[in-house]
Image: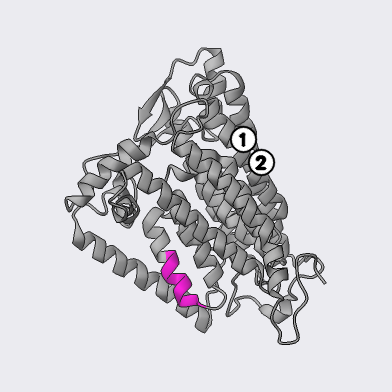
Amino acid sequence: MDGDEVPMTRAGSRPPWDAVRAVAPPVAAWAATRAVLLLCVFKVLLLPGPDVTSDISGIYHGWFEVLRSGSFPHDDVTWQYPPAAALAVLSPGLLPFLDYASAFFLLACAADAAAFSLFLYAGRRPGRRLTGAWVWTAGVALLGPTAYSRYDLMVTAVAVAALFAAAGRPRVSGALVAFGALLKVWPVLLLTGAPLRGRRARSLWGAAAVGALAITLLLVAWAPGGLAFLTFQRDRGTEVESLGALVFHLARQFGWDGEVLLNYGSVEFVGPYVPLVSSLALVLTAAAFGWLLLWRLRARKFTSATLADAAFTALLLFVTTSRVISPQYMIWLVGTAAVCMTRRAGRMGLPAVLVLLAAGATLLEFPIWFADVVTSQGPGVALLAVRNGLLVAASLVACRRLWRSTVTGQRRRGEDHPGATAARQPNCSAT
């Protein structure tokens, strides 16, 4: 019997007290860490460095006023989000008795609690474990108040629900993927390991396509400018926390005459060779997706964990090679890593640990030593190098493990037998 499973009663249900005892430690840890996060965003506790909540009271609130007037902020280049992002920005209006920032923080906490509840529920089912709940609890806490100061946590909660729903409710999963992608694009990567044939595949992909089209048409019809985000990203440069930025942090020590500016809503390098490094980052991203395509063509053995493992790997590649690795991007990785760790058959244990370490390094470089990051000095750049190195390592390990588990067929003891789940294209590949 596995360590975190409990014996069944004669009627086939778990003893209530054993169930409570099993979930009590992660619930206590979640409650304690979230109390600290709320104290931070409400400024009872203050961390060194810039105020991470300023985007909510400033930028988000400004967008809220524009959206409430019946238009997307299409004249603002910092609005770089799909149309459903308007729902997240408008959501604090559900709590009109609070100021905008306070309402946003509480709704972010509610989304956090919803995701945590999914991990608890999924972790108590056969073949699952509560490790995912622990990963989610630790990962969000390690990111500090930034986690509650961006709407990425809300998007990640939708993505987590989509991955968990894929096993038994493919239509619901597809609709959630569509909704998530229209909140912030990246949840479309959840389909990387989705089945391509069979009834469940048709349900999943059909619901995703119909849902995306319906939501887009509805939001574009509601207000003009909903698709302006498609052009606002094209002139982005190299953000100071990205992998490519390490080149310029080093070059500044040898007299590189570029500078750091607030550009397109983020702190970016501007100067000689920046366009070249930005283009190389795009090439690296294209190469990463080329590898994912090759994996998909070569994959032969799918297990119940493949969908989440593939989504996590694709997301790691996307984030690591991006021109912008903002701190809130780590929330995406924490969420998908936690889903992977809920499945006993998953292969992503080491990459998940590396992501947790990267989340802790992220808190240290932003906001605590962010001034040193901006000036390319001191522990800030060292922490940034460690964080990005951990992401590179996690990406490589995840790619290797995904390839070995689905292409070369090397499995761990206790994994689903490949012949029992699928041949080349399964009817269901889900968490």
Residue 203: x, y in percent? 46, 79
- Whether the residues at callouts 1 and 2 have beta carbons within 8 Å, the answer is yes
Residue 388: image quadrant is: top right
At 20% from the left and 61% from the top, the residue drawn is 222
* Residue projecting furthest to the front: 17
Residue 246: x, y in percent? 56, 28
Secondary structure state at the residue bearing disc 2: helix
The quadrant of the picture occupied by the C terminus is bottom right
Q: Is residue 171 magenta?
A: yes
**Residue of label 2:** 357
Which stretch did the figure color magenta? Answer: 169-177
Question: Disc 1 residue type?
Answer: Ala
Residue 372, relative to residue 36: is it above or below? Answer: above
Q: Main secondary structure of the magenta part?
A: helix
Colour mapping: one colour
Question: Disc 2 residue type?
Answer: Leu
Q: Give the camera-side residue of 138 and 362.
A: 138
Residue 34, relative to residue 175: is it above or below? Answer: above
**Residue 143, can we see it?**
yes
